[in-house]
Amino acid sequence: MAEVLSQSQIDALLNSMRSGGDEGKAEEKQPEKKYRKYDFTTPRKFTKDRIKMLNGIFENYTRVISSRLNAQLRTSCEITVESIEEQKFYEFNNALTEGDVLAMVNVTVQPREAGSEDILTEDPVMVYISTATALGMMDRLMGSENESERDIPMGYAYTDLELQLYEYMMKDIIPLMGTSWENYVPVSFEYERTQVNPTLVQLLNLDETVVLVDMKLTFSQSEGRMSIVLPGNVLMSIFGEVNRESMGRKVASEDNSSEIFDTLRDSTLEIIAELGDTQLTLSDIYHLNIGDVVDLGRSKDSPVFLEIGGYQWFTGRMGTHKKNMAIKIDEVCYSAEQRSE
């Protein structure tokens, strides 16, 4: 028996035919926009501007140590900043293994203000180079020409000789970090010691806020990783001094403005008033006498040009003031085109 459609089904079928059947198609779901989660219980210590500032500083540092390593290792080494992010120290510490080695660095902030003492930060900065990369660099340092990455077993322990070479390399590249801060505040970085097996030592409070600078080392046949851990307390000390430097420069510029204007007011400035110009032969100049008249081709009422530093800045008219020759300024030449005429 044929199925009989109800009136509502007939109306729906007719409406679908009029609209071309679009209503019967399932609407495509729009992909849900993802937002980065923010933990309000542990707010960020450093703003985006500070992170951007650190990115510029360490971009400069990578260029400096790239040149140094190219010369020492006699190979092509390119170093780039992969990321700079704020995190808890345990996130970095949990990624370390027993065989890893860290270079501990002392940081000293040197205020520019006279009479101020240097600030030695309590928490050390830590520098990490992946084991395979560090051993490859040591091989090149000792004269090897093999640039391929070695297979390093898990938990590999550095030998005493390798630790000495590691210390030698760190003492060479760590102090160069201070040159990247020179535009903001004098900061010196000094190698302190090599920390073997850092997983067994509490270097920082696990919940301490740090800024992790991840860098990528690219050689001709291998790649590696270098990380710098900047404790939050160290950065707060440095940024505090940077703020004082900025405020000091601002106050100094405001205080010196009156002195600058006083000096300018007392300075002399040569102003040349020119009514016109003409050309004379040396014979005519030789025969000039008192009372002779030189025709400039302009009337006495013509505008006079006032030149400063070889440029026309004003136009005026000749006259007298208290029985002295004077120029009354009529117009200021604001545009460069007017001044160069």
Image (cartoon, grey):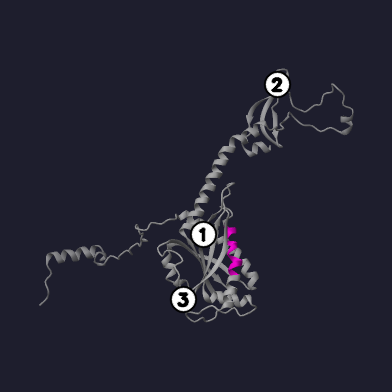
**x%, y% of residue 324?**
73, 20
**Which badge, 1 or 3, is on the more N-terminal residue?**
1
> Is 178 part of what is drawn in magenta?
yes
Measured in 3D between alpha carbons, the distance from the residue under mark 2 to the one under mark 1, in whole angstroms, is 64 Å
In the picture of the structure, the residue carrying the numbered disc 3 is 98
For the stretch drawn in magenta, the main secondary structure is helix
Answer yes or no: is residue 16 visible.
yes
Answer yes or no: is residue 20 visible.
no
Labels 2 and 1 touching (C-beta < 8 A): no
Give neighbour class at mark 2: few <14, some 14-19, many 20+ (Cα, 10 Å): few
The three-letter amino acid code for the residue at tag 3 is: Glu
Q: Who is closer to the viewer here, 135 or 168?
A: 168
The residue at the point 44 percent across, 67 percent down is 202
In the picture of the structure, the residue carrying the numbered disc 2 is 319
The secondary structure type at the circle numbered 1 is: helix
- Of circles 1 and 3, the one toward us is 3
**Which badge, 2 or 3, is on the more N-terminal residue?**
3
The secondary structure type at the circle numbered 3 is: loop
Figure quadrant of the N terminus? bottom left
The label number, if any, that marks residue 55 in the structure image: 1
Q: Who is closer to the viewer here, 185 or 298?
A: 185
Q: Who is closer to the viewer here, 336 or 204?
A: 204
The three-letter amino acid code for the residue at tag 1 is: Asn
**x%, y% of residue 302?**
70, 26
Give neighbour class at mark 1: few <14, some 14-19, many 20+ (Cα, 10 Å): some
**x%, y% of residue 101?**
51, 72
> Is 117 part of what is drawn in magenta?
no
